[in-house]
Structures are given as structure tokens and as C-alpha cells.
Image (spheres, rainbow, N blue to C red):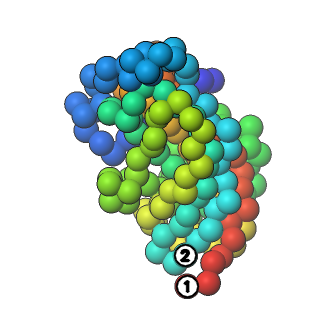
Amino acid sequence: MKFQKLAVCVASLALPLTALAAPAADASSARGYPYKAPVVKWAGHARTLGDHALVGSRYRCFGGNVGTHVWVSLKQGPKITKMSLKQLKKAEGTSAISKSWYDTNKTDPQLVYVVCNGKWQHQTFRLKKEKGHLHRGWAFLQFCLFDSHSDPTSQTSTKGFAFRYSKVWVTRSPV
């Protein structure tokens, strides 16, 4: 199950793999605390604002910021709504069955970053439209975090990877 989620998130990366392939020096060890696996405590508070959406999150990762990546996605549609979270987690190709899909792949890369300093971070991510229009209602949220210890070229390694999949209520913010 975790492998499938890793494969979905790795396949969704927009950055060139060469930018992420080499792990950065372990900044956490240099500061005197050991490396720990990343954790996504929550992701949600989704708001649509026309051509983009905002998703809040709380996460923690170690090892410095070099070689990190985050991918956040919101998908809506009748087929998505009818599926349980358990079914959505197991499903492949949810972007194909969605009527609307927003994610961080089209967002300016300088705005899509994580802070991996061992402290809990509260961060809002901006998602851009891939297709359709998000509206007020339920959506499938995928939040995938890769720290400096992840190996995006590996199909089996889960080191340096954390995720949170959930169904969230999207609100519409005034423009």
C-alpha cells in the first residue's frame, strides 16, 4: 500500500529527477540531532479562488532543504465523490476520472518548497488548475512530502517520504 502511494507521488513529480537524486548533506546531524523520518500531521483547509486554490498543512522534516519536494493535489468530480477514502487511496488514475484537478505542478517552483529544519511547520500551498474548476464541496486531497533523504529514482524505498490522503471540504473564498 505504501509502495503504491509512493509510486503515485513519484510519478507526479514535476521537477527533473536529477535535481532530487543526490541526497543533501545531513544538516540535522551537523546540528546535533539525529535524522528522523518526515511526518505530515495534517493537510486541509482547502479554499478555491478561481484559477487557483490554497491548501494548509502541518508537517515536520529533517535534513535541510536541498533536494526536497512537495506535491499537493485536489481532485473533484462525481466519480471522486462517490468513492470512499479507502477506495481513493487504492485507486490509480484518479486524475483521469476527475472533472476538476488542481495541483502544485503548475505553480511557480519558487513558491512550492518545504522547510526541513526539524521544527513543525504550518504552511499554505498554492495549487494551479490542471483541468476544470474546483467548486464548493468534497475533494480528494493528496499531499506528498519528499525530504533530502528520499530517492525518487527508487521504486521500493520509502525513506524520506511522508504523505497524507484525505477527503476535504473545499470552501470558496471571495475573489
- Tell me residue 124's x, y (percent): 55, 57
Nearer-the-camera pick, 92 or 25:
25
Pointers 1 and 2 in contact (CB under 8 A)? yes
Q: Which mark is residue 164?
A: none
Quick check: can you spot residue 75? no
Residue positioned most to the left: 18
Q: Label 2, on which residue?
A: 49
Left or right side of 54 for 152: left
Residue positioned most to the bottom: 175
Q: Earlier in the sequence, mark 1 or mark 2?
A: 2
Secondary element at image label 1:
loop
From this view, report whether residue 135 is shown above or below residue 66.
below
Secondary element at image label 2:
loop
- Tell me residue 87's x, y (percent): 71, 39
- Mark 2 residue type: Leu
Q: Quadrant of the N terminus?
A: top right
Q: Residue at left 38%, top 23%? A: 27
- Mark 1 residue type: Val
Give the Cα separation between the discs numbered 1 and 2.
6 Å
- Tell me residue 51's x, y (percent): 46, 74
Question: Across the whole image, how many numbered discs are drawn on residues?
Answer: 2
Nearer-the-camera pick, 130 or 61:
61
Q: Residue at left 68%, top 44%? A: 42
Residue positioned most to the front: 32
Q: Quadrant of residue 48?
A: bottom right
Q: Residue at left 61%, top 55%? A: 56
Q: Quadrant of the C terminus?
A: bottom right
From this view, report whether residue 19 is shown above or below residue 30.
below
- Tell me residue 29's x, y (percent): 43, 16
Quick check: can you spot residue 44? yes
Nearer-the-camera pick, 60 or 12:
60
Q: Which mark is residue 175?
A: 1
